[in-house]
Image: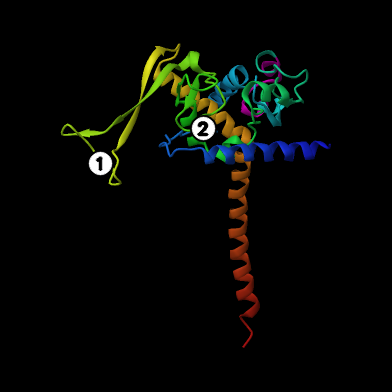
Amino acid sequence: MTRIFRIVLVAALALAAGSAARAAETGWKLDRANVDVTDKGSLQAGARTFVNYCLGCHGLALMRYNALRNIGLTEEQIKDNLMFTADKVGQPIATAMNAREGKEWFGVPPPDLSVIARSRGADWLYTYLRTFYRDPSTATGWNNAVFPNVGMPHVLWSLQGERALRTEELMRDGKPVSDGHGGTVKVSRFETLTPGSMGAVEYDRMARDLVAFLVWAGEPHQLARKQLGIWVLYVLTILVFLTYFLYKSYWKNVH
């Protein structure tokens, strides 16, 4: 199997996982992530969170460790602080878990996250990371409001804390509000069971940094591409004017 074929296969599996997840969505309102891929401090914080909490199950097979130099890290910093699953900085950011182990533990192998931000979107990822709750009916003891019955446990629970999801009828003047279809309007809210090591604002910032890193990892050259696109438009604009004046000059004496 060639390297190119492996890359295409990994990307296809990630996109397929995203499609399957979309089919399970319940229409939970997504929060705006507002990520900034130009903020290298945010990207570095997100990379640190990824390798410490996500890399055990999920890899970034389409990216190599040395690509992290593009977010302001030196090769020494990468080796000392982030390179847990490789011996050389030129190797891919692969997970420590193999597919067989993932299937045994979670029912399906955890997907590679190289293109998850492109297939899911930053808002979906940001909301997903913040809507886990305790559910004793699941195999992992966790569930998610954005992706019900997800096989992934809440690996960040020690930071966010444990929460329960309460669903109640919306009341008005002491009576349930009708939904117009014979039922009542339901509202859901999270209730803290045990606090985590981070406050709500700090956890949201951590989740935003992680999402920003995944957005950048999905297309690490997006800033250069956009800048190049602007220059191409400038050049094309100049060529349009030159072409117009050449046209006028050529045809001015033609009757």
Q: Report the Cα–Cα distance between label 1 and label 2.
A: 32 Å
From the viewer's perspective, is residue 250 above or below residue 42?
below
- List the single residue furthest toward the left: 173
Q: Which mark is residue 84?
A: none
Quarter of the image holding residue 131? top left
Q: Quadrant of the N terminus?
A: top right
Q: Quadrant of the C terminus?
A: bottom right
In percent of width and height, residue 123 lies at 48, 36
Do we see residue 98 in this rendering?
Answer: no
Q: Nearer the viewer, mark 1 or mark 2?
A: 1
Q: Which mark is residue 178?
A: 1
In percent of width and height, residue 171 lies at 22, 33
Which residue is found at the position 78% from the left and 20% from the top? 88
Secondary element under disc 1, as helix, strand or loop, is: loop
Quarter of the image holding residue 43? top right
Mostly what secondary structure, the magenta segment? helix
In percent of width and height, residue 111 lies at 64, 31
Residue type marked 1: Ser
From the viewer's perspective, is residue 252 above or below residue 229?
below
Quarter of the image holding residue 26? top left
Q: Is residue 123 left or right of residue 251?
A: left
Residue type marked 2: Leu
Write down the residue under mark 2.
125
As rendered, which of 57 and 53 lies closer to the eye?
57
Secondary element under disc 2, as helix, strand or loop, is: helix
As rendered, which of 81 and 59 lies closer to the eye?
59
Residue 47 magenta: no
User: What segment is highlighted magenta in the picture?
Assistant: 69-79
Instruction: Please tell me which of labels 1 and 2 falls first in the chain.
Output: 2
From the viewer's perspective, is residue 7 above or below residue 213?
below
In percent of width and height, residue 19 lies at 58, 41
As rendered, which of 10 and 142 lies closer to the eye?
142
